[in-house]
């Protein structure tokens, strides 16, 4: 099946969020058979599902790999991102409110999405594939509602770190602006000196154009940039100050931790702590992929990530 035909099968859905008057956007791509075990993608702190699991390179997207493996693939945009509505506070001065989209709020949105996916797919449980800060949201829901969640793939997972001395608890305004240059810096900051780029300039330029277009107002700013809720950034910093927003010990789903060897946000020490902290998980894996950073799903070695996630998700769900 050609990639164009796969695109033609994509369906879009709008559902109510826990915030009255604000809706959530879900995209769905089904396998050729029309049915399969449902998998829901949970994005991270700075870009929505279209720029992550669904972003297509010449060899396809992560979502394409999951669909070819027979999964019914869904992806959620949180309020404030992509196709979902924006918080009213995002239309005001950033200093007028505290950080938007903390994990407690996001977990309610994710639960609404999982409930909708279960009904549409006719499945008791939904497996979650999450990236970065999104792994905390997925973990929070999995611990709170274990009957809803099948298997967990946590890519570039945020972990708890011991708090530094004498520094105040992190906080921030409601939202912030992220430019294409700031995103490009993220693709190079953890690559060791002398190593070739993990993403070609041509591929990045194409991605960056789509990234800026994810916010209709981005090109009206100087420089152009995407407005995003600040809650995820604040929560990552709080996790590194000893406040992880969920308890991995409550999670009873099988868990696979996947990270790139150069990921400065999900280090070996972070993975060791998380692996041990998922004490009730009946199955645990810790996979480290070479020549990858925190954005491995968009990098040259991305197919290794896709393959590892498919291999883990293909196993039968825990009873």
Image (cartoon, rainbow, N blue to C red):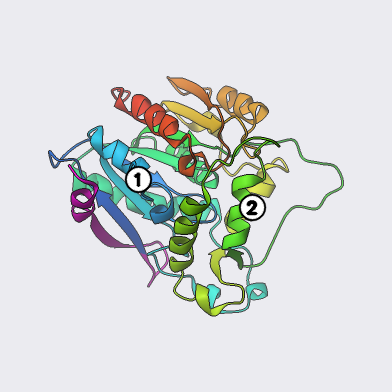
Q: In the rendered structure, does residue 8 fall within the stretch colored magenta? A: yes
Q: Nearer the viewer, residue 117 or 157?
A: 157
User: How packed is label 2: few (under 14 Cα within 10 Å), some, or many (20 or more)?
Assistant: few
Residue 71 seen in this snapshot:
no
Tell me the element at label 1.
loop
Q: Nearer the viewer, mark 2 or mark 1?
A: 1
Tell me the element at label 2.
helix
Q: Which mark is residue 58?
A: 1
Report whether 241 appears left or right of 268.
right
Q: From the image, tell me which residue sits under label 2.
A: 185
Residue name at image x 47 percent, y 61 percent: 211
Residue name at image x 68 percent, y 48 percent: 237
Residue name at image x 49 percent, y 58 percent: 205
Q: Which residues are magenta?
A: 1-23
Residue 221 on image: x %, y %? 57, 77
Q: Quadrant of residue 223?
A: bottom right
**Quadrant for the N terminus in the image:** top left
Q: Quadrant of residue 245?
A: top right
Residue 96 on image: x %, y %? 65, 76
Q: In the rendered structure, which disc, 2 or 1, sits on the residue that comes first in sequence?
A: 1
Q: Quadrant of residue 2?
A: top left
Q: Is residue 79 above or below residue 155?
A: below
């Amino acid at each position: 099946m050609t990639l164009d035909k796969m695109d033609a099968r994509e369906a879009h859905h709008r559902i109510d969020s826990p915030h009255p008057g604000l809706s959530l956007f879900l995209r769905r791509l089904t396998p050729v058979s029309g049915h399969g075990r449902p998998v829901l993608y949970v994005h991270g702190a700075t870009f929505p599902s279209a720029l992550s699991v669904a972003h297509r390179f010449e060899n396809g997207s992560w979502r394409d790999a999951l669909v070819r493996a027979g999964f019914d693939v869904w992806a959620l945009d949180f309020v404030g991102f992509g196709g979902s509505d924006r918080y009213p506070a995002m239309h005001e001065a950033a200093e007028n409110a505290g950080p938007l989209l903390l994990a407690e709020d996001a977990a309610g949105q994710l639960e609404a999405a999982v409930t909708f996916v279960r009904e549409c797919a006719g499945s008791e449980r939904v497996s979650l594939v999450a990236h970065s800060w999104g792994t905390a949201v997925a973990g929070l829901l999995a611990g709170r509602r274990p009957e809803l969640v099948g298997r967990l793939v946590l890519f570039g997972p945020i972990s708890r770190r011991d708090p530094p001395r004498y520094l105040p608890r992190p906080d921030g305004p409601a939202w912030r602006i992220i430019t294409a240059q700031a995103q490009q810096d993220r693709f190079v900051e953890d690559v060791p000196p002398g190593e070739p780029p993990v993403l070609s300039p041509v591929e990045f330029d194409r991605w960056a154009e789509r990234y800026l277009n994810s916010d209709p107002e981005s090109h009206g700013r100087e420089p152009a940039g995407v407005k995003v809720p600040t809650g995820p950034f604040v929560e990552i910093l709080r996790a590194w100050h000893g406040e992880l927003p969920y308890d991995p010990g409550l999670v009873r789903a099988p868990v696979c931790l996947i990270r790139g060897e150069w990921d400065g946000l999900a280090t070996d020490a972070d993975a060791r702590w998380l692996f041990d902290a998922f004490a009730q998980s009946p199955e645990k894996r810790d996979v480290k992929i070479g020549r990858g950073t925190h954005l491995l799903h968009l990098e040259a070695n991305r197919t290794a990530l896709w393959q590892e996630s498919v291999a883990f998700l293909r196993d039968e769900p825990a009873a």
